[in-house]
Amino acid sequence: MNNYITAILLIIYLPKVAYLWVRENWKALTIAIGSTLALLVIFYNFGNREMTSNRYTDNDVAVNFQDLTAAFATGGKRTMQVEMIAIHHTAGNAKIKVYDLAKYQFQKFGNVAYHFLVMPDGTIYQLRPLEERVPHAYGCNDNAIAVCLAGNFNDYPVPEVQRKTALRLCRWLLKKYKLEASNVLAHGELTIYSPNNVTDCCGKMFDIKKFRQEL
Ligand SMILES: [Zn+2]
């Protein structure tokens, strides 16, 4: 019974007590709320400073991508015109974090090796500007755009969302550079440029011919 009465008293008096407390402490309260909001804004901007959402919409093909180009070192300007689009797979865990992949590639090749990374959920990361060279394939670092799909397509086919996203990205690139579907090549097909490109990249289960047909 005592608890019951206490509860009723609390319900009646709590708003009153809260009101009195706020009236006495409104300055401290304002400072606390204000500084919390300021900190939230600072952390939000800090966390997103390297990643901005962008959208290429020219040539009737819209491509949304996360721009990470400011996060990685430059590999220098390309010395040749773009003649093709090279398709790669990471040959690893599809859920790899983009920064982990970039760190690994930086240690191995001295720079991020792809212009674009397409994730299984359809997210596209742009890692380097299009006018820069990236170390992705022998004899093709200056004349190709490197598009990589996260995953190992020696083990399983490309998830449809990821495949469709890569198709849309390639369509946009083909229009931008006035190229044909035949200019989209798997890494392993780049032996026409160098025999050192003998590789099963972008995966035995990646049907590159069907991919070209759908462009
Ligand atoms: Zn490759």
Image (cartoon, rainbow, N blue to C red):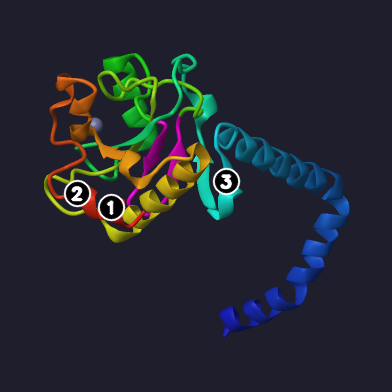
- Real-space Cα separation, disc 1 to disc 2, in angstroms: 8 Å
Which label sits in the foreground, 3 or 1?
1
Q: Please give the name of the residue rendered at 81% of the width and 47% of the height, measured from the top-left corner.
A: 30
The answer as to whether callout 2 falls within 8 Å of ligand 1 is no
Q: Mark 1 points at which residue?
A: 211
Q: Position of residue 7 (x, y in %)?
A: 63, 78
Name the spot of residue 207 as percent of width and height, x first.
19, 51
Which numbered disc flags the more N-terminal residue, 3 or 1?
3
Circle 3/circle 1 CB separation < 8 Å: no
As helix, strand or loop, the secondary structure at mark 1 comes to: helix
- Using the image as rendered, state which of residue 82 and residue 202 is in the foreground: 82
Does ligand 1 reach within 8 Å of label 3's beta carbon? no
Of tags 1 and 2, the one toward the viewer is 1
Residue displayed at 64% across by 82% down: 5
The answer to the question of whether label 1 and label 2 lie on touching residues, with beta carbons closer than 8 A, is: yes
Q: Relative to 173, is 109 above or below?
A: above
The answer to which quarter of the image holds residue 138 is: top left
Q: In which quarter of the image is ligand 1?
A: top left
Rendered image quadrant of residue 163: bottom left
* Residue drawn at x 47%, y 21% as measured from the top left: 132
Label 3 secondary element:
strand
- The answer to whether 101 appears left or right of 198 in the picture is right
Q: Name the residue under label 3.
A: 56
Query: Camera-side residue: 196 or 76?
Result: 196
Tell me which segment is drawn in magenta.
Answer: 115-127
First-in-chain label (3 vs 2): 3
Q: How crowded is mark 2: few (under 14 residues within 10 Å), some or many (20 or more)?
A: many
The residue beneath circle 2 is 206
Q: Name the outermost residue toward the bottom.
A: 1
Q: What residue type is labelled 3?
A: Tyr
**Residue situated in front as seen by the camera: 53 or 187:** 187
